[in-house]
Amino acid sequence: MNETFLYVVGSAVLVGLAVLYAFFGPYYEVGIASWYGPGFHGNRTANGEIYDMNGISAAHKSLPFGTVVRVVELETGRSVVVRINDRGPFIEGRIIDLSKGAAEELGIVAKGITKVGLRILRWPPGDRP
């Protein structure tokens, strides 16, 4: 009984720590995020999907397609989970381009750009660096 109890409690603690690390651990990258939409809506993304500016996705210069990233707006702490399906941004100093839908979740559409931290939640199969 004691061993089973300790195993269950220990497992719960490890899972809890993993969740805390995912939310509060170090950022993979910190920098400026922007959003893109109207001129690209309906076009193909770099991975071949049709871009939906109202969906939740993002462009990154080097992360593998399919990487799932939590984007945290550093001023407010608001966050959104996106999947990388495009390349960009192509403006110096920016680290990620969000779809308009993702930007709305962060509350940055009117502002246009903001400082964010990126946390990798899931690498695509076989692409973890």
Image (cartoon, rainbow, N blue to C red):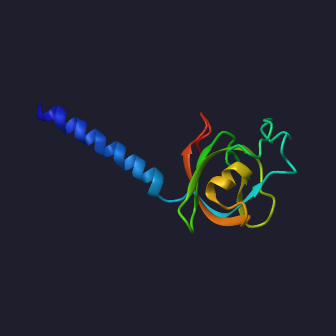
Residue 15's place in the image compared with 92, above or below, is above
Residue 126's place in the image compared with 115, above or below, is above
**Is 50 situated left or right of 1 in this image?**
right
From the viewer's side, name the closer residue of 76 and 68: 76
Q: Residue at x 70, y 49 (%)?
A: 101
Spot occupied by residue 21 in the image (x, y as percentages of width and height): 43, 53
Residue 109's place in the image compared with 69, above or below, is below
Q: Can residue 59 be seen in this view?
A: no
Where is residue 73, by image quadrant?
bottom right
The N terminus appears in which quarter of the rendering? top left
Q: Which residue lies furthest to the left in this view?
A: 1
Q: Residue at x 73, y 64 (%)?
A: 110
Spot occupied by residue 19 in the image (x, y as percentages of width and height): 41, 47
How many numbered discs?
Answer: 0
The C terminus appears in which quarter of the rendering? top right
Q: Can residue 5 be seen in this view?
A: yes
From the viewer's side, name the closer residue of 114 and 64: 114
From the viewer's side, name the closer residue of 119 and 100: 100
Spot occupied by residue 75 in the image (x, y as percentages of width and height): 57, 69
Q: Residue at x 55, y 66 (%)?
A: 76
Q: Residue at x 56, y 49 (%)?
A: 120
Spot occupied by residue 105 in the image (x, y as percentages of width and height): 63, 53
**Is 75 situated left or right of 6 in this image?**
right
**Is 1 situated left or right of 89 in this image?**
left
Where is residue 113, by image quadrant?
bottom right
